Amino acid sequence: MDNHFYGIIPPEFSSLHHLHHLQLDMNSLHGSIPESFAFLSELSLVTLMDNNLTGPIPRSLFSNCTLLGNVDLSINFLTGKIPEGIGNCPNLWTLNLYNNQLTGQLPLSLSNTSLFNVDVEVNHLSGELPANVIGKLPSLFLLHLSYNEMVSHDHNTNLEPFFTALGNCTDLEELELAGMGLGGRLPNSIGRPGAQLYSMLLQENNIYGSIPSNIAYLSNLIVLNLTSNSLNETISAEISQLLNLEQLFLSHNFFTGTIPAALGQLPELSLLDLSNNQFSGEIPPSLGNLVQVNSMFLNNNLLSGTIPPELGKCDLYKLDLSFNALTGSIPKEILHEIRIFLNLSHNYLDGRLPVELSKLEKVQEIDVSSNSLTGNLFPEISNCTALRMINFSHNSLQGNLPDSLGDLKYLESIDVSGNNLSGLIPTSLNKLQALSFLNLSFNNFGGPIPSSGIFNVVTNLSFLGNPHLCGSISGMSTCSKSRKWFG
């Protein structure tokens, strides 16, 4: 494996009658899988993943396969149907066919095997979700069907039969049904796979309704992803019983009402994504109990009220509360640990721009644009040495831009447009080799625009609405040689 072999698979392999393992993974083999593999009656493992193989899976591969246990043909360009004869392999325990171009349905004969690992995602498989197959594979622990063209029962309206069948798979640990447009409500039988399930990925479907209370039976669940569905009711408070849950993705749905305070009872939660819904009311202070959370996304909702200072108890690396209707000042309690980004933009926040932002030494992006913040842009901003993006636009900031901005050597983008800033543009900005976007428009800056660095590549669009600026940039007025400028 991984030997840079190319060409076709030699048909002569079929003469190796006592061959047990054939591993040709991660090469550049092309052509079809030889029909002559049928002569390898002692074969127990065939792995041809990550090549350039084409054509159908030969039926002959499963004509003499009583010892065959592991088949991995994933990451190729195989076409056609999965042969029905695969059911002739009673000891088959792993079937990996993901990332191909296979069509048709999962063969019913798979129920005659000993499968506990089925991964066929990213193909063109169709038909109803294979409840009649899955229900007869009690040892199944991994089932990946994502990104196929399957539908739920009753013309893509009923998920109940499939989840009921999963109840026979008491050892199931991973269930992935993403990106298929599956329709229907989450049934009460969602809890039937039982306590062993730790990952359930159902994103990018057409599932609607609520999250049922029976989800509490999945007591070992670590990851639940329901992003990009049509869920449009409530989140059951029983979700708080998922005490091992680490990642909860519920974004891009139509959830309404308030964010359940019970979410604050998930002690292991490290990621909470409720963005792009229609949640209203205040952010529950109980979310501050999520001391393990490092990523919290509540953006693009209808949330109101103030930002709870209790969120400062969370170990936040990423916090996004943008595009809501939040009011009040930015609590200094939350400004101590954020390491990746802070986005509070497009709200109704007021008060002074907190100097405590300078304590975010590892933060990479700060966006507090489109609020009603006042005060100055303080020189201590240079303490945020990892900053790549600053967006303070569309507020009511005053005073000068500090020269210390030139110390932010990783800065790529700065936008302070739509404020009341004044004085000279700091020449220190021309030291920033990474800086590629600059927007100082609609302020009260005056004097000559500096030269070199970023100022050699920007246009007058970076300076619109500053009538007292001058410089050699096309579209700007020329500076008077006799006038003295002061910051």
Image: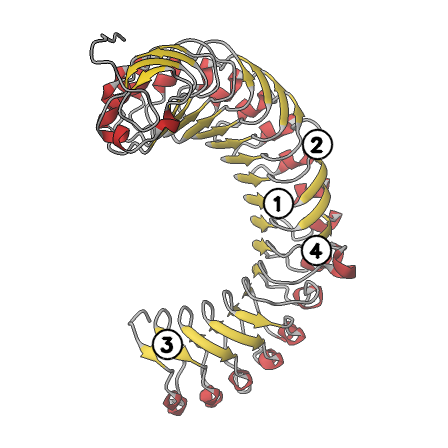
Few, some or many C-alpha atoms within 10 Å of disc 3 (few <14, some 14-19, many ≥20)?
A: many
Color scheme of the displayed model: secondary structure
- Looking at the image, is mark 2 or mark 1 earlier in the sequence? 1
Contact (Cβ within 8 Å) of mark 2 with mark 4: no
Where residue 44 appears, as percent x and y from the top left, is 46, 78
Alpha carbon distance from label 2 to label 3: 52 Å
Numbered badge on residue 256: 2
The amino acid beneath tag 4 is Phe
- Secondary structure of the residue carrying tag 1 is loop
The amino acid beneath tag 1 is Ser
Q: Is residue 122 above or below residue 262?
A: below
Where residue 196 appears, as percent x and y from the top left, is 58, 51
Q: Which quadrant holds residue 138?
A: bottom right
Residue 30 relative to residue 311: left or right: left
Question: What residue would you read off at disc 4?
Answer: 163
Question: What residue would you read off at disc 1?
Answer: 228
- Secondary structure of the residue carrying tag 4 is helix
Numbered badge on residue 201: none
Is residue 307 at least partly visible in the picture? no
- Secondary structure of the residue carrying tag 2 is loop
Of circles 3 and 4, the one toward us is 3
The amino acid beneath tag 2 is Thr
Question: What residue would you read off at disc 3?
Answer: 29
Q: Residue at x 63, y 57 (%)?
A: 180
- Looking at the image, is mark 2 or mark 4 earlier in the sequence? 4
Where residue 231 appears, as percent x and y from the top left, is 69, 42
